Image: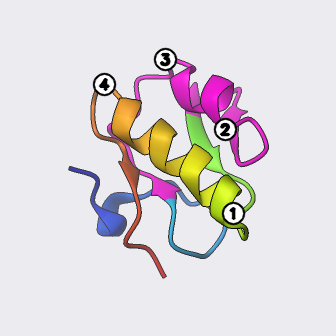
C-alpha cells in the first residue's frame, strides 16, 4: 500500500501520488500517460497532473490497481 508520507517530491499536490516503492515498470505511464511521467535520472514514476474528470480518474485508478508494488496512492492532499 502506498504511503503518502513517503511519496516522491515531484508529485503534484492532490489525491493521486507515487511513493518510493516504484520500480519503474512503466505500467502507470502506459495506462494513464496524461497523468504519470518518469523521473529519468532516478528511474521512477510520479504524478505530474491530477485527473479532473470521471474518465481521467478511472484511468488513474486503473493504473493504481495494476501497479505491481502498490506504489500509487489515492489518499494524497
Lateral position of residue 41 relative to residue 18, left or right: right
In the rendered structure, which disc, 4 or 1, sits on the residue that comes first in sequence? 1
Asked if residue 42 can be seen in this view, the reply is no
Tell me the mark number nearer the camera, choosing from 2 and 3: 2
Q: Which residue is mark 3?
A: 25
Task: Give the quadrant of residue 38.
Answer: top right
Q: Which residue is mark 1?
A: 51
- Tag shown at residue 68: 4
Residue 16, x across and y down, in percent: 51, 62
In the rendered structure, which disc, 2 or 3, sits on the residue that comes first in sequence? 3
Q: CA distance from mark 4 to mark 1?
A: 21 Å
Q: Which residues are magenta?
A: 17-44
Q: CA distance from mark 2 to mark 3?
A: 13 Å
Lateral position of residue 62 relative to residue 11, left or right: left
Whether the residues at callouts 3 and 1 have beta carbons within 8 Å, the answer is no
In the rendered structure, which disc, 2 or 4, sits on the residue that comes first in sequence? 2
In the rendered structure, which disc, 3 or 1, sits on the residue that comes first in sequence? 3
Task: Give the quadrant of residue 36.
Answer: top right
* Crowd class of label 1 (few under 14; some 14 to 19; many from 20; radius 10 Å): some
Q: Which residue is mark 2?
A: 32
Residue nearer the viewer, 30 or 44: 30
Amino acid at each position: 500500500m502506498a504511503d503518502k508520507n513517503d511519496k516522491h517530491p515531484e508529485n503534484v499536490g492532490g489525491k493521486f501520488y507515487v511513493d518510493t516503492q516504484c520500480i519503474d515498470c512503466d505500467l502507470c505511464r502506459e495506462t494513464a500517460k496524461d497523468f504519470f511521467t518518469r523521473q529519468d535520472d532516478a528511474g521512477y514514476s510520479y504524478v505530474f497532473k491530477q485527473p479532473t474528470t470521471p474518465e481521467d480518474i478511472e484511468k488513474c485508478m486503473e493504473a493504481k490497481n495494476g501497479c505491481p508494488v502498490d506504489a500509487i496512492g489515492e489518499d494524497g492532499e
